Image (tube, grey):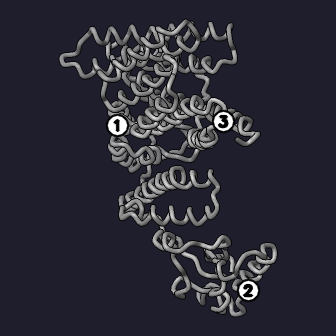
């Protein structure tokens, strides 16, 4: 084990916790995966226990990104990573499984999981951790009970009463927990969690008031929730605004509801939040926003739109959300019908490219980069070639890796174009049959097209000579490179200034 592994691990966890506060899930996921790699060393202290906790956190991120199947598999890996998890940890896992079951409309299963979560937590000696698990469990059980009331036919008033009671208990427990933590351990991570759980319970309780016909009480409760907002987590804030607007809408205050549902670009909106965690219930809410005329043509603090989040999730419910989002976008764009369809198609393709990029980079390339093996770049090329060789629509969005040998570039005598016949293509088959030399190297070069309509270069071959001079200088700094194994990856852009 490297001498500084423990320090490196702690630095990763500290940074990951900061990203968690800002709800920057992709950034946190990257750091957790780095920490998991450190835990692969058997000599690392408490490696399996730490690995179990890390995998649990990773599962939570996949759930927040709408990747429910992947989250469930990761939770199973978490349970298997360490042989003796505490009852509180098992309770946390059951809670996560319950959340995913509820998102997938398995409400009876979700309620049973939340009840077991609470039972396990109550078996533990009294502590902030066990109290927190009980608090979370009772609130989520209340929401699954409300979902079961929605399905009851005729409506079962006992289920609605139970949901009222359970969500109210969540609020009370969250408030008690905050008071206790503030005195016992003000720096505990559970303080912010308890604050969030109180707000979420208040927001969800508005649904019960609306179901009972008490819309004025729903509005008052939603307003109280808004006053308690910390606004640190943009997704929690956006969900809260949805519930506030929903209460206003059902109370007949449509204009004020739209003020809550419409958000300026640069902030997470209610449609985005609903698309981040797709489900039948959230799609129904999304349809309400679309029918109400909410503007879906905005982007959050990370530059993602509601359409981006729906496509990135890639779950059955997310795919059902996409037509809802597309219809709302058509109303927002207000272009000629043909132009609107073209614009939506472009945006959908861009979102699909992001999803595929996340898949290939996070799941296939990053593990190779962490290990830093000899010939890593060659291995990455093989991974990329295999990825795009699969005959699917998504894979065909990416082009193969084209390059040319530097010696061919020099001998050609001028700047080539795409039809010059110099380009070579790296394939996974070639990678399997030919062992690369250790000094195999490809240089990326971007240059401006200066020849106008006559070609990419001027009559003097200025850009061609510049590229050769740049590579020759590079070779002097790296004399170990074999010129015959040196390749060029050329990308050009047409100048509008020449």
Q: Quadrant of the C terminus?
A: bottom right
Q: Could you say which disc has been placed on residue 38 in the image?
A: none
Residue at the spot 51% in from the left edge and 22% down from the top edge: 85
Q: Secondary structure at mark 2?
A: helix
Distance from the alpha carbon under mark 1 to that under mark 3: 50 Å
Q: Which residue is mark 1?
A: 287
Q: Is residue 473 left or right of residue 77?
A: right
Q: Residue at x 56, y 15 (%)?
A: 129
| Residue 301 at least partly seen | no
Give the residue pinned by disc 2. 465
Q: Secondary structure at mark 1?
A: helix
- Left or right of 294: which side holds 454? right
Q: Which one is earlier in the sequence, the residue at label 2 or at label 1?
A: 1
State the CA–CA distance, disc 2 to disc 1: 59 Å
Residue behind mark 3: 44
172 w.r.t. 96: above or below: above
Label 2 neighbour load within 10 Å: few <14, some 14-19, many 20+: some
**Nearer the camera: disc 2 or disc 1:** 2
Near-viewer residue (460 or 38): 38
Task: Looking at the image, tell me whether mark 1 or mark 3 is earlier in sequence order.
Answer: 3
Residue at image position (45%, 28%) is 242
Q: Residues within 10 Å of mark 3 (few under 14, many from 20)?
A: some
- Which one is closest to the eye, mark 1 or mark 3? 3
* Residue 326 shows in the view: yes
Which is more N-terminal, label 3 or label 2?
3
Name above or below for residue 238 compared with residue 321. above
Q: Characterize the local packing of mark 1: few (<14), some (14-19) or many (20 or more) Cα atoms within 10 angstroms.
A: some
Residue drawn where x is 57% and y is 28% of the image: 49
């Amino acid at each position: 084990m490297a001498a500084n592994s423990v320090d490196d691990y702690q630095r990763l966890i500290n940074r990951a916790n900061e990203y968690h506060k800002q709800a920057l899930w992709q950034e946190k996921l990257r750091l957790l995966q780095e920490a998991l790699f450190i835990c692969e060393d058997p000599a690392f202290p408490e490696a399996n226990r730490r690995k179990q906790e890390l995998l649990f956190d990773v599962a939570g991120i996949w759930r927040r990104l709408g990747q429910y199947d992947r989250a469930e598999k990761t939770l199973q890996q978490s349970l298997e990573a360490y042989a003796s998890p505490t009852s509180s940890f098992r309770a946390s896992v059951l809670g996560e499984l319950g959340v995913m079951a509820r998102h997938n409309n398995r409400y009876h299963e979700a309620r049973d999981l939340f009840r077991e979560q609470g039972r396990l937590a109550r078996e533990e000696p009294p502590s902030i951790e066990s109290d927190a698990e009980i608090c979370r469990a009772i609130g989520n059980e209340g929401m699954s009970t409300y979902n079961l009331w929605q399905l009851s036919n005729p409506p079962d008033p006992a289920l609605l009463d139970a949901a009222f009671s359970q969500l109210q208990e969540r609020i009370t427990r969250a408030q008690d927990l905050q008071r206790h933590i503030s005195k016992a351990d003000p720096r505990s991570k559970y303080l912010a969690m308890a604050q969030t759980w109180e707000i979420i319970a208040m927001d969800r309780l508005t649904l019960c008031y609306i179901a009972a016909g008490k819309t004025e009480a729903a509005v008052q409760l939603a307003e109280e929730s808004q006053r308690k907002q910390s606004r640190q987590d943009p997704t929690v804030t956006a969900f809260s605004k949805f519930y506030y607007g929903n209460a206003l809408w059902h109370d007949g205050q449509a204009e004020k509801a739209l003020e809550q549902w419409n958000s300026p670009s640069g902030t997470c909106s209610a449609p985005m939040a609903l698309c981040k965690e797709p489900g039948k219930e959230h799609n129904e809410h999304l349809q309400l926003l679309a029918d109400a005329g909410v503007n879906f043509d905005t982007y959050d603090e990370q530059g993602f739109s509601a359409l981006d989040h729906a496509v990135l999730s890639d779950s059955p419910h997310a795919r059902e959300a996409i037509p809802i989002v597309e219809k709302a976008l058509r109303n927002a764009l207000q272009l000629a019908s043909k132009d609107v369809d073209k614009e939506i198609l472009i945006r959908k393709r861009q979102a699909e490219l992001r999803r595929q990029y996340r898949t290939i980079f996070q799941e296939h390339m990053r593990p190779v980069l962490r290990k830093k093996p000899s010939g890593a770049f060659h291995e990455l090329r093989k991974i990329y070639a295999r990825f795009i060789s699969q005959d699917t629509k998504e894979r065909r969005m990416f082009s193969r890796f084209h390059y040319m040998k530097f010696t061919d570039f020099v001998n050609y005598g001028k700047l080539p174009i795409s039809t010059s016949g110099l380009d070579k293509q790296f394939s996974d088959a070639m990678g399997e049959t030919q062992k690369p030399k250790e000094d195999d190297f490809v240089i990326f070069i971007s240059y401006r097209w200066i020849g106008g309509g006559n070609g990419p270069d001027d009559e003097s071959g200025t850009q061609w000579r510049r590229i050769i001079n740049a590579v020759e200088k590079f070779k002097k700094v790296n004399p170990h490179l074999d010129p015959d194994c040196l390749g060029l990856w050329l990308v050009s852009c047409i100048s509008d200034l020449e």
